[in-house]
Amino acid sequence: MMPHMLTRSLDRAATIFVLIVAACGILIPLSNLLLPAGSALQVPTYLVALWGKYVCYAILALSIDLIWGYCGILSLGHGAFFALGGYAMGMYLMRQIGTRGVYGNPILPDFMVFLNYSKLPWYWHGFDMFWFAALMVLVVPGLLAFCFGWLAFRSRVTGVYLSIITQAMTYALLLAFFRNDFGFGGNNGLTDFKDILGFNVQAEGTRAALFALSCVALILAFLICRAVVSSKLGKVLIAIRDAESRTRFLGYRVESYKLFVFTLSACMAGVAGALYVPQVGIINPSEFAPGNSIEAVIWVAVGGRGTLAGAALGAVVVNYAKTFFTSGVLAPYWLFMLGALFVLVTLLLPKGIIGTFNTRWDQLSTKTPNAESAAREDGVTEPKMAE
């Protein structure tokens, strides 16, 4: 039933997106592992990790587009759910270090030994098992989103007020995780990872596998979002976005719909953070910075709000531009360039890259045939030049 629901929601554009991501998930790892170094077609390991990071950002952008593009919930704190998923995976990776740490303690991570912890905090128990960490990747962001959403939506907080509250939430978490006594490494965060499921995280094969897994996660997240927005639930979400009061008067429990999609979106962001950490090699409180959440919203706006594929494209395009421009003389001006990009897209491409393309394509594909058929029905033809 579920696979049928996922595949039924695909149109031509969605199928093309899935095929492109699947091709990248297969060809890039194979190119990295099978082709000799120095070959023109060989993808270096550092690029595999870099593009893997972009794919994780694309999953985060999808989660934001689901709530903003289709339900009208503008969250400026989704970076918090991304970071919580990353910390859950980072805790598992830290527990895998064992006696190979600097201090050689088989139980306590190095930063706890340095800070004179006498025993492992209770909330670290269980993270030595991968299945428990994977469960927490979903449960922790999802539970926070559920509690926050239940309070906010029940109080009918909407619009800019909701955006400000989400930003305050992520800033509060930023301050909390900066504390050394909070048990998460303080300012330095969690790093120096060794293994994941027994495989060296620095090995080429592991990085290739993580990239392929990230592509699979992106495809699954996209299919889930497509299944949601193309169903009756999706139509209710769009109605809430366009006219929340009217939807409420029709008898729909708007709070329940918003709470469901907000929680689902937070779980997707948590998965993105969990895949991000082993590929980058570190997770620290800077991931909670409100600026990161605002930047993720810009990705969605650039790619095309309410298009899903456009959100993923915007994440890749903006982050590739960030990597390109921050490595040269323009590095000090990157934030100004990012702001200018957002302004230009808002003015020139208000529907984003994909949204504008879809609009122009629809106009070109329907304008000429309709005009010709109408002329034939009325018996009117274009005047011909005299010979």
Image (cartoon, rainbow, N blue to C red):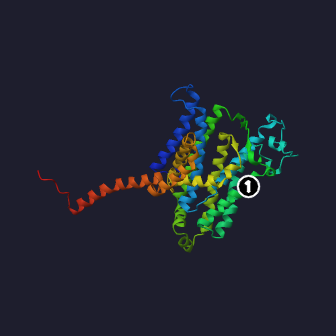
Farthest-out residue, left: 387
Pinpoint residue 17: horizontal percent, then vertical percent.
49, 46
Compare residues 25 and 253 and report the one nearer the observer: 25
Circle 1 SS class:
helix
Indicate left or right for 49 with 341 as reference: right
Question: In the rendered structure, which amino acid carries the disc numbered 1?
Answer: Leu
Q: 21 above or below 247? A: above
Q: Quadrant of residue 94?
A: top right
For label 1, count other residues whose C-alpha is less than 10 Å away and answer few (under 14), some (14-19) or many (20+): some
Work out which residue is located at the far right of the displayed protein and give it: 118
Residue 274 is left or right of residue 240, and the answer is right
Residue at the disc numbered 1: 175
Count of marks overlaid on the render: 1
Residue 143 coordinates in the image, percent (x, y)? 70, 58
Q: Is residue 1 above or below residue 110?
A: below
Residue nearest the viewer, comparing 37 with 298: 298
Q: Position of residue 349 (x, y in %)?
A: 45, 55
Q: Is residue 233 visible?
A: no
x then y, percent, for residue 180: 80, 49
Determine whether, in the image, residue 308 is placed left or right of residue 371.
right
Residue drawn where x is 66% and y is 66% of the image: 152
User: Is 189 in front, or is 309?
Assistant: 189
Which residue occupies 74% across, 45% down?
188
Seen in the image, is 67 located left or right of residue 352?
right
Q: Among all residues in the image, which is located at the extreme bottom?
A: 249
Residue at the image position 62 percent from the left and 59 percent from the top: 262
Q: Quick check: can you spot residue 355?
A: yes
Residue under the point 61% across and 42% down: 53
